[in-house]
């Protein structure tokens, strides 16, 4: 090994500060290496980084120890000679000192080892989009929006998610998602840029380039899992601690995502239009200051429009249908009723139910899984008595009124 083992003087000097154990481990990690091998530099750098972590952990107890300071200087010299980066994978027989740059959960551990202080666990955020569409933002605000056309859900330094929404029923402002495009941006050695695209009746289990994973296939830092062929896929980006669920229910798509807060909020001024972060613009809201209205309060078809059969649900039958899947009358239940009255499509019942299941799978705080309608400007809907009484009033309108204004596509 030649100059690479100029650390021999460290191993013969016994110290009480722990530097000998660091040096012994380094020799163990490198003794089998051969400079002629193609991966020598990579493995040698991994060993050096492990050595560096070990010395840092002993910095306080080894203060004033000449062997320790000689080791630190020697590590720096060798890292420079071999062009080793300070951050990267390490060789270790102790899991506590292993730092995997393609595992977000390991980043916190690495910081703890480096600074010698405990750091709080990362905070995760949840965002979901389903139905007509209903948006749950990273702040757990619940909105019902129009947002027809292409809109960015997420656009930060690590990930971009764009959805395209189309009208569900002609003459109504409600839309639903028929296309989702996701860009996982390149990150160190963990993954090259990967683009995923789903459309109605085309929910692939692969990225646009035909691959199912990013980066080294052995680490699986980014990969797609097909749960139900053509109907449900999951994407796991381990290097950024992010999980994405995409489903097709009926003719439309739903999306749910969990992402660490520090990464979700890493974006510049030009990336400020993100529905998951800021919510929908006020001009695109169907709900009124957070209150979810019944669809009869939406835009009506003009007089003289071509007549179609009326929508197939009343408030009572829509509530009964939604209660089959969602037993608690939270905002997901009310969204289900809203969607059935708007579209007459029973698939939206499954969409609301699946959206709630995705919350339970991905949202970090169980106490925030459910959102209940409440009165007041800050709420997500009026209380249930208002909702029901308003619905009964509207349902009591004459059949002629319904036949005039509500049409199927």
Image (cartoon, rainbow, N blue to C red):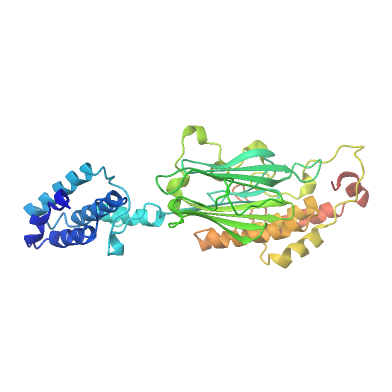
Question: Which residue is rendered at x = 77% and y = 53% of the image?
Answer: 390
Q: Position of residue 383 (x, y in %)?
A: 67, 56
Residue 184 percent location from the top left of the image: 51, 45
Q: Is residue 211 left or right of residue 232?
A: left
Q: Nearer the viewer, residue 154 or 399?
A: 154
Image coordinates of residue 142 in percent, x first then y, are: 61, 50
The number of discs equals 0
Query: Looking at the image, is 292 positioned above or below residue 333?
Result: above
Front one among 258 and 120? 258
Residue drawn at (24%, 51%), measured in percent from left and top? 35
Left or right: 99 with respect to 378?
left
Q: Is 155 or 139 nearer to us in this picture?
A: 155
* Relative vertical location of residue 334 with respect to residue 207 in this rendering, above or below: below
Q: Residue 63 appears at what percent x and percent y?
A: 10, 53
Using the rendered image of the protein, determine whether residue 380 is visible from the camera's viewpoint.
no
Q: For residue 348, what is the image quadrant?
A: bottom right
Whether residue 322 is visible to the viewer of this picture, yes or no, is yes
Q: Quadrant of residue 27?
A: bottom left
* Rendered residue at 46%/40% (across/down): 157
394 relative to 127 in the view: left or right: right
Residue at screen point 79% across, 55% down: 345
Q: Residue furthest front?
A: 36
Residue 20 lies left or right of residue 251; in this view the side is: left
């Amino acid at each position: 090994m030649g100059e690479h083992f100029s650390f021999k003087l460290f191993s013969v000097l016994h110290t009480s500060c722990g530097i000998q154990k660091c040096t012994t481990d380094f020799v163990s990690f490198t003794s089998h290496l051969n400079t002629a091998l193609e991966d020598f530099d990579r493995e040698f750098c991994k060993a050096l980084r492990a050595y560096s972590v070990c010395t840092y952990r002993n910095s306080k107890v080894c203060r004033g120890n000449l062997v320790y300071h000689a080791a630190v200087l020697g590590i720096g010299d060798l890292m420079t000679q071999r062009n080793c980066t300070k951050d990267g994978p390490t060789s270790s027989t102790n899991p506590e000192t292993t730092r995997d740059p393609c595992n977000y959960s390991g980043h916190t551990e690495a910081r703890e080892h480096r600074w010698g202080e405990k750091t709080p666990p990362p905070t995760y955020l949840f965002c979901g989009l389903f139905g007509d569409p209903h948006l749950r933002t990273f702040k757990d605000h619940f909105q019902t929006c129009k947002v027809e056309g292409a809109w960015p859900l997420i656009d930060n330094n690590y990930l971009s998610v764009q959805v395209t929404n189309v009208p569900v029923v002609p003459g109504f402002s409600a839309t639903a998602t028929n296309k989702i495009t996701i860009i996982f941006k390149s990150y160190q050695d963990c993954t090259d840029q990967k683009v995923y695209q789903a459309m109605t009746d085309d929910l692939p289990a692969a990225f646009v380039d035909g691959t199912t994973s990013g980066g080294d296939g052995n680490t699986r830092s980014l990969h797609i899992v097909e749960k139900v062929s053509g109907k449900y896929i999951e994407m796991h980006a381990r290097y950024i601690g992010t999980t994405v669920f995409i489903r097709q229910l009926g003719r439309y798509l739903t999306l749910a995502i969990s992402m660490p807060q520090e990464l979700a909020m890493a974006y510049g001024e030009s990336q400020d239009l993100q529905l998951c972060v800021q919510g929908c613009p006020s001009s695109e809201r169907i709900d009124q200051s957070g209150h979810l209205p019944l669809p009869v309060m939406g835009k009506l078809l003009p007089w003289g429009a071509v007549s179609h059969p009326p929508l197939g649900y009343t408030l009572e039958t829509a509530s009964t249908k939604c209660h089959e899947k969602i037993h608690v009358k939270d905002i997901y239940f009310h969204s289900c009723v809203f969607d059935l009255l708007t579209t007459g499509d029973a698939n939206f019942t499954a969409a609301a139910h699946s959206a709630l299941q995705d919350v339970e799978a991905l949202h970090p705080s169980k106490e925030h899984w459910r959102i209940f309608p409440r009165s007041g400007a800050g709420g997500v809907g009026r209380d249930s008595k208002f909702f029901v009484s308003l619905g009964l009033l509207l349902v009591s309108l004459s059949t002629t009124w319904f036949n005039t204004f509500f049409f199927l596509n």
